[in-house]
């Protein structure tokens, strides 16, 4: 034992100052760990689709009870708002977090790296140059910001990143020198960054130790490959799960950008379907719009497919109320509540193991989208109820036949046979609904006026395959 200790002291004396810790792997390799380790790619520009990839990976890791999460990073940076969202997502994971700078981590990439507990770097990799920049309208370059805007933005970014550096034990002075060009950095008498410059570190510079007690500047070591890093961290016996972009993230981003419009189309489609006899184009369009809406939330990693099922159950209850058991209200109210809950929860960002009830900040965006959609739909529905039944478009929206096999001639004869007959409104006509004529329950519409349930009505004609009635005063 004494011989080993003397040999270790001699080897330490011969090593040059600041040599990477990788030269003595036996001193840094962790004991083997069980469980799972997730690898998340942070590649290319940090833009909105990456949020979906990171969110999906973090939620999968949390559901699997993963012990660790490694960001495989190679990026020139990207948008600050996207970076902030990714940092918030990473904060949900309670296990160990690592960044492996696999070539470079510039700008927003450096911010995200600081949000992990430990940073390692590949040979000849670099990290830093994290000053905020104003992107051009095309997003392909950067423009010079006005001094006041630059100062305000730098201050906000510095506060955000400083919080993460303090949380994860990174050197705050190093991080601020990467962001603010007015910050010089001198440690142990060595000038690492002059005022007016933005700090960028190579892998060797980032791993060099300073201070008393001695600690690395930013990186805990230079490691040849990601596999070597996993060995060093003790994950050789762990199940390795790599999250890969699917391409659906861009589709999900587009869908979620038009979420309020999809809600309006869906609400109006269902409304028109309920106001016209049979089942036709409005119902198909409405259901499709809602399905695409839930697909966007699913691709974004915001909701599970179960909320679509909840919405379908709610819609079925609402249809039962309107078409089968009118006037009972229980099924209709229950269905409407289920549909509203599903629409909101379909885009609420919930995490495994977290609170079951969403917080107000989580509900803010979904409630805003739904509120705008309901208001717009209400205004459009009011206009359609007054004017649509009088237009030729209404005929195209009405189902042409309940069975699809009845001939046009026989269908026409059947409609004519009801001319002049009287009956009773079996449901409110707004303007579509049901009426009972000669003990037969029919799909009918009024001429635009609202008719209360139980009021006497008379058949005065037909529009396409819809029987038109008027209230008997």
Image: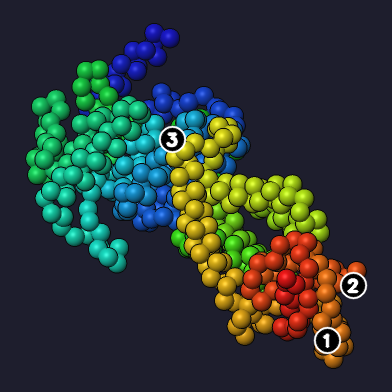
Question: How far is mark 3 from mark 1, CA to CA?
Answer: 69 Å
Left or right of 211 in this view: 160? right
Name the front one of labels 3 and 2.
Answer: 2
Q: Residue at x 35, y 28 (%)?
A: 167
Question: In the displayed structure, would residue 181 be above or below residue 407?
Answer: above
Question: Of marks 1 and 2, which one's residue comes earlier in the chain?
Answer: 1
Q: Quadrant of the C terminus?
A: bottom right
Judge from the rendering whether residue 219 lies leftward or rightward of residue 100; answer left or right: left
How many angstroms separate mark 3 from mark 2 (CA)?
A: 67 Å
- Which residue is label 2 attached to? 438
How far apart are the two marked residues, 1 and 2, measured between alpha carbons? 14 Å
Task: Identify whether 184 is placed above or below 308.
Answer: above
Image spot of residue 356 (x, y percent): 59, 34
Q: Residues within 10 Å of mark 3 (few under 14, many from 20)?
A: some
**Residue count near mark 1 (Cα–Cα under 10 Å), binned few <14, some 14–19, many ≥20:** some
Residue at the front extreme of this rendering = 473
Residue mark closest to the camera, 3 vs 1: 1
Residue 258 place in picture, x, y as percent = 48, 63
Tell whether 367 sits left or right of 307: left
User: Would you name the residue on which mark 3 appears?
Assistant: 91
Which numbered disc, 3 or 2, marks the residue that appears first in the sequence? 3
Horizontal side of residue 23 vs 252, given as left or right: left
User: Residue reaching furthest bottom?
Assistant: 409
Mark 3 or mark 1: whose residue is earlier in sequence: 3
Front in this rendered view, residue 463 or 9: 463
Question: For numbered disc 3, what is the local secondary structure?
Answer: loop
Q: Which residue is mark 1?
A: 416
Nearer the observer, 386 or 180 = 386
Residue at image location 52% in from the left, 24% down from the top: 31
> Which residue shows up at 69% across the image and 66% down it?
451
Asked whether the beta carbons under mark 3 and mark 1 sit within 8 Å of each other, the answer is: no
């Amino acid at each position: 034992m004494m011989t080993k200790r003397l040999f270790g002291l001699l080897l330490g004396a011969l090593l040059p100052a600041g040599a990477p810790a990788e030269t003595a792997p036996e001193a840094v390799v962790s004991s083997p760990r069980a469980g799972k380790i997730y690898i998340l790619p942070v590649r290319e520009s940090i833009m909105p689709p990456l949020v979906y990839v990171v969110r999906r990976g973090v939620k999968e890791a949390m559901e699997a009870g993963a012990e660790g999460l490694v960001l495989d990073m190679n990026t020139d940076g990207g948008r600050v708002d996207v970076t902030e969202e990714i940092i918030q997502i990473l904060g949900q994971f309670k296990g160990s977090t690592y960044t492996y700078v696999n070539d470079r981590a510039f700008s927003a990439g450096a911010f995200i790296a600081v949000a992990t507990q430990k940073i390692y770097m590949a040979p000849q990799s670099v990290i830093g140059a994290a000053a905020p920049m104003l992107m051009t309208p095309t997003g392909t370059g950067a423009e010079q910001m006005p001094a006041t805007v630059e100062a305000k933005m730098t201050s906000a970014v510095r506060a955000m990143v400083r919080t993460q550096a303090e949380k994860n034990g990174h050197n705050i002075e190093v991080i601020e020198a990467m962001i603010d060009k007015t910050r010089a950095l001198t440690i142990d008498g060595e000038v690492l960054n002059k005022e007016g410059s933005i700090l960028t570190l190579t892998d060797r510079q980032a791993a060099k130790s300073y201070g008393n007690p001695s600690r690395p500047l930013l990186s805990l070591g230079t490691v040849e490959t990601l596999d070597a890093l996993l060995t060093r961290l003790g994950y050789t016996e762990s199940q390795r799960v790599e999250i890969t972009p699917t391409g659906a993230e861009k589709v999900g981003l587009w869908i979620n950008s038009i979420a309020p419009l999809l809600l309006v189309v869906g609400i109006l489609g269902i409304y028109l379907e309920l106001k016209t006899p049979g089942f036709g184009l409005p119902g198909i369009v409405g259901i499709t719009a809602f399905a695409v809406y839930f697909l966007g939330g699913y691709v974004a990693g915001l909701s599970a497919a179960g909320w679509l099922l909840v919405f379908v159950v709610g819609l079925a209850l609402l249809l039962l109320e309107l078409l089968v058991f009118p006037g009972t209200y229980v099924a209709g109210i229950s269905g409407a509540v289920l549909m509203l809950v599903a629409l909101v929860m379909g885009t609420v960002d919930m995490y495994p193991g977290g609170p079951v009830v969403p917080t107000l900040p989580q509900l803010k965006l979904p409630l805003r989208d739904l509120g705008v959609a309901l208001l717009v739909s209400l205004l459009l529905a009011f206009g359609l109820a007054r004017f649509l039944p009088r237009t030729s478009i209404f005929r195209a929206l009405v189902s042409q036949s309940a069975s699809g096999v009845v001939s046009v001639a026989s269908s026409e004869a059947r409609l004519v046979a009801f001319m002049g007959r009287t009956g009773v409104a079996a449901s409110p006509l707004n303007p579509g609904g049901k009426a009972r004529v000669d003990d037969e329950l029919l799909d009918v519409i009024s001429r635009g006026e609202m008719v209360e349930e139980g009021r006497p009505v008379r058949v005065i004609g037909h529009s396409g395959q819809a029987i038109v009635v008027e209230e008997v005063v």
